[in-house]
Amino acid sequence: MNTATDTLTSATAHRPHWEHDVTDEFRTETIDGIECTDRAGIAALTGLALNSLNMKALKDDAFPQPIRGQRIGRTFWYPVDAVRAYAQHLAELADAGKPKPVADGDPDELLDPPAAADAIGINYETFRRYVALSRPYWDGIVEGRPLLPRPDVVTIAERGNLGQLGEHREWRRATLAEHQASRPGSRATAADGRTGRPANS
């Protein structure tokens, strides 16, 4: 078995204006050439408690299949791509039919992650997960409609006291409003008064 363990944890305390990606907080191993994570990693991306996750593994047909179809040692390992798809699936189910209009304000105002989360009516931890799930879409790795729009401004700078580089993302209020309005099935209206439609439709 060819494995390369990469345990990544945040080295600095959470600061409200800098997001630490959820993908930096769970263990991955490369198994049979495929990047995999365990159930703790699935919990980190989905926000589910481990006991709830274990129940879904037994009852949810959409739950990812472990690589090799069995435990490796004492652990089930799941392809990270399948885990991301499952987390996106759960997020879409949670949001289905419940589009939240973006809070009123200057459409050109730039919102940092905590403010953007507040503007679309979700908590910051959920927003962080949405960022992690949306990044493959922003980077062109995955096709389709991301949970969050690409940020309008990305600044690279040091964060914390260790000199580590990090990304600080900001979204225009109008960008968030248009994205909310374009959700499939959404009756919300974008900031400019147009009703959007899903990307690539």
Image (cartoon, grey):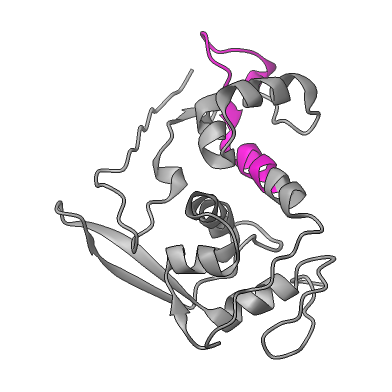
Quadrant of the frame with the C terminus = bottom right
Query: Residue 86: x, y in percent?
Result: 68, 40
Instruction: Point out the residue furthest to the top here.
Output: 73
8 and 178: which is toward the camera: 178
How far across and how far down the image is residue 19, in percent?
Answer: 38, 57
Q: Position of residue 26 (x, y in %)?
A: 43, 35
**Residue sitting nearer the eye, 105 or 156:** 105
> How many marks can you see?
0
Identify which residue is drawn at 81% across, 69% down.
Answer: 186
> Is residue 129 something that shows in the picture?
yes
Residue 74 belongs to magenta span: yes
- Name which residue lies at 82% across and 58% down: 97
Q: Which residues are magenta?
A: 68-88
**Residue at horizontal 55 percent and vertical 80 percent from the top:** 173
Q: In the rendered image of this protein, does residue 87 appear above or below residue 114?
A: above
Give me the residue at 56% from left, 39% from top: 47
Q: Quadrant of residue 45?
A: top right
Q: Is residue 34 visible?
A: no
